[in-house]
Image: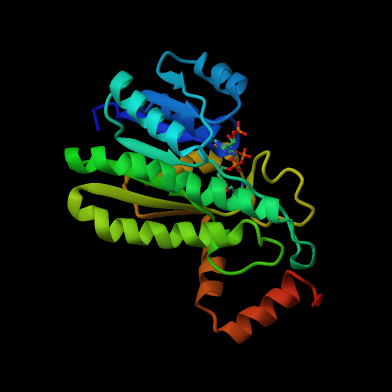
Amino acid sequence: MTERGWKTVWITGASSGIGQELAKLMDGAADHVVISARSVNKLEALSERSRAIASFPLDVTDTEAVSDCVKTIEVTAGPIDLAVLNAGAWALMDAQHLELEAVRTGIEVNYMGVMNAIDALIPPMIERRRGHIAIVASVAGYRGLPRSIAYGPTKAALNNLAEILRLELEPHGITISVINPGFVDTPMTQNNPFPMPSIVSAEEAAKQILEGLKRRRFEIAFPRGFIMVMKLMQLMPLGLYFWLVRKIVMRGKT
Ligand SMILES: NC(=O)c1ccc[n+]([C@@H]2O[C@H](COP(=O)([O-])OP(=O)(O)OC[C@H]3O[C@@H](n4cnc5c(N)ncnc54)[C@H](OP(=O)(O)O)[C@@H]3O)[C@@H](O)[C@H]2O)c1
C-alpha cells in the first residue's frame, strides 16, 4: 500500500452494482484501478470518469483469459496489491423446477470464476510475499435458504474456500478477506419477488467493503443488525433452524 492507499487494485464484476460503486470509491484510494466484466461499454463509461481507472473486459469463466488478464495488469499497471473477486450470478429457483443450466452458471461464475482468478494471483503474490485477495460471497452462504439452490451453495463454498486460503496463504504474506453482504440494491436484486429486509444501497455496500479492506479484516459482513440475526441462525440447532425458516420465510409452505 502507498500513502494514497493501494497501488494497483483489480475488481471483477465492476460493470454494475457493488463492483461499480467500489471502483468509484477506489478511484480515490488506489493509484491504478483495473475493472473487469463482460459489458465493454459499461466498463468504458466508468473508466472515462478517471485516468486512474482502466478497463479490462473479461469473462471470469474463461481460465486462459483470466490468467492473461492478471499477467497483463501486472505488466501494465504493476503488481496487483488487492484483487476484489466480485463477479457473480444469481437465479431464483425452486427445487421442483430445477434449471441445470442456471445451476451450472452459478458454479462457473461464482465459484470457478474465483478459482480461475486465485490460480493466476497466488504464484506472483507468493513470490512477492504480499498481496490481498478479497472474495465476495454472501450471507446466503451461511445456511441453506429456500429458492437459492443455484446460488447459496456457491457462496457457502466461497466462505469455506476463504478459510482454507487464509490458513494456507497467510504464512506467505497474503491477506485473505471474505465479503458477506446482506441484501444490496443492485441489478441483481431488482426483480426479487420477496421482501429483502435491511437492504442497503450499492454505495453503502461499497463504503463498508472499502472500510473493511483498509482494516484488512478477514470477514467483512454488513449491515450489522441483519448479520447478527443471520449469525444467530447459523448457530441454531438444525430442528430450530428448519422450523424458523418454514415459519418466517416460507410462511408454512412445505
Ligand atoms: N445484491 C445483493 O443483494 C448481494 C448480496 C450478497 C452478495 N452479493 C454478491 O455481490 C457481487 C456483486 O453483485 P451485485 O449485487 O453488484 O450484482 P450485479 O449488479 O448484477 O453485478 C454482477 C457483476 O458480475 C459481472 N459478471 C457476471 N457474470 C460474469 C462473468 N461470467 N464474467 C465476468 N463478470 C461477470 C456482471 O458484469 P457483466 O454482466 O458485464 O459481465 C456485473 O458486473 C456478486 O458476487 C453477488 O453474488 C450481492
Residue 210 visible, this orientation: no
The vertical placement of 9 against 216, above or below, is above
In the rendered image, which quarter contains the C terminus?
Answer: bottom right
Q: Quadrant of residue 33?
A: top left
On the image, the x and y values in percent for residue 221 come to 47, 55
Q: Residue placed at 33% from the left, 28% from the top? A: 71
Q: List x then y, in percent, for residue 247.
A: 74, 77
Residue 128: give x, y in percent of width and height.
18, 38
- Which image quadrant is residue 165 in? bottom left
Along the viewing direction, whichever of 127 and 19 lies nearer the viewer? 127
Which of the 4 image quarters holds residue 52? Answer: top left
Q: Residue at x 32, y 19 (%)?
A: 76
Judge whether 87 appears above or below 74 on screen.
below
Is residue 33 shown left or right of residue 252? Answer: left
Q: Which colour scheme is used?
A: rainbow
Determine whether 37 is above or below 113 in the image: above
